[in-house]
Image: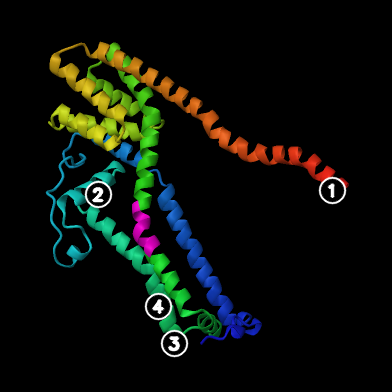
Amino acid sequence: MFDLSNFATPDALGSPETLILYCVAFAVLLLLFGVIGLWTMRDRTADRVRALAASMREATHEKAVPLTKGDEVAPSGWKKALIPEDPSERMQIRFQLGKLGFERPDIVEIFFLIRLFLALVTPVAVFGTVALARAGVLPESIVESLNATPPLRLLQIAAVGTAVGFYGPGYWLKSRIKARQAKIREAFPNALDLVQISVEAGLGFDAAINRVGHELTRVAPEVAYEFLLLQIEVQAGRDRETALFDMADRMGIDEAKSFALVIVQSLQFGTSLTSALKTYAAEMREMRELAAQEKANRLPVQMSGVMSMLMLPALFLITLTPIIIRYNAIY
């Protein structure tokens, strides 16, 4: 059906119109990659921490960070075909996005709109290019390239682009959440030690959380953001127990949940907060040491497979080479 002999002839590639079109397409591609790089490399956690710290210093209510969230609104109209109607599923997606600091009321709709847009970009581009080529708008070299491409290959490109655009945001969301949890898990023991030292120095729990949150702004912005948000919620009149467990859920690590449980139990039963933090800090140090030992004990097992793959061929060569030499010498 399609002639492969006419694919991108030298005369067509050397025409000024085609070269200008290729240069423009390459420039647009570089600009797109640059915008994506700036968006992904931007440290939004530090921006949120600075906004929270500034809001705590402001006395006016207009510049305060909103703590209340609007009621969950069910999708209506054409949005029903795009957004899940199950409230639990929408809340789960909102919760996952909230772990990254996206707290807008319409963040779920924006997330699914982005997924729809990315899923439609590739097929629209492919079929739009085919339609423009049939209309005679594109240069002759591109038309010949499209004619040389089988229709099945175009459908495959459109299908792969749709799958990547639809499932890509979900994969990106999970990878960002795992990266954020890893940073929090790494910095949380040191933050707990600072809270313990601040409490032992005479500060109250709220003042210690506030001080540690400001001190960790540059070193661990994720933990600082959660501590400052916890302090703002408590100052706004929210129950401390609920705020602590919400902070632990946002962090998504077991250490934060245990920390919240220790603080709540200490406040409920009237025990010494200093001794509770000291005991839990000692337990966290032991847990970190045990985790390091477990990781070190797994190394021999992990290295055995690599060593066997690298050593067995050499052992076979050393063992079988004399036998092969003798066999060739005899026969």
Q: Depth check: 158 or 67 in front?
A: 158
Closer mark to the observer between disc 2 and disc 1: 1
Q: Of the residues under marks 3 and 4, which one precedes in the sequence?
A: 4
- Residue under pointer 1: 328
Q: Position of residue 259 (x, y in %)?
A: 26, 24
Q: Label 4 is placed on what type of residue? A: Phe
Q: Gap in Å between the C-alphas at discs 3 and 2?
A: 42 Å
Residue 127: which numbered mark, if any? 4
Secondary structure under tag 4 reads helix
218, above or below 92, in the image: above
Q: Is residue 169 magenta?
A: yes
The region drawn magenta spans 163-170
Q: Position of residue 163 (x, y in %)?
A: 38, 63
Closer mark to the observer between disc 1 and disc 3: 1
Q: Of the residues under marks 2 and 1, which one precedes in the sequence?
A: 2
On the image, which quarter does residue 98 sit in?
A: top left
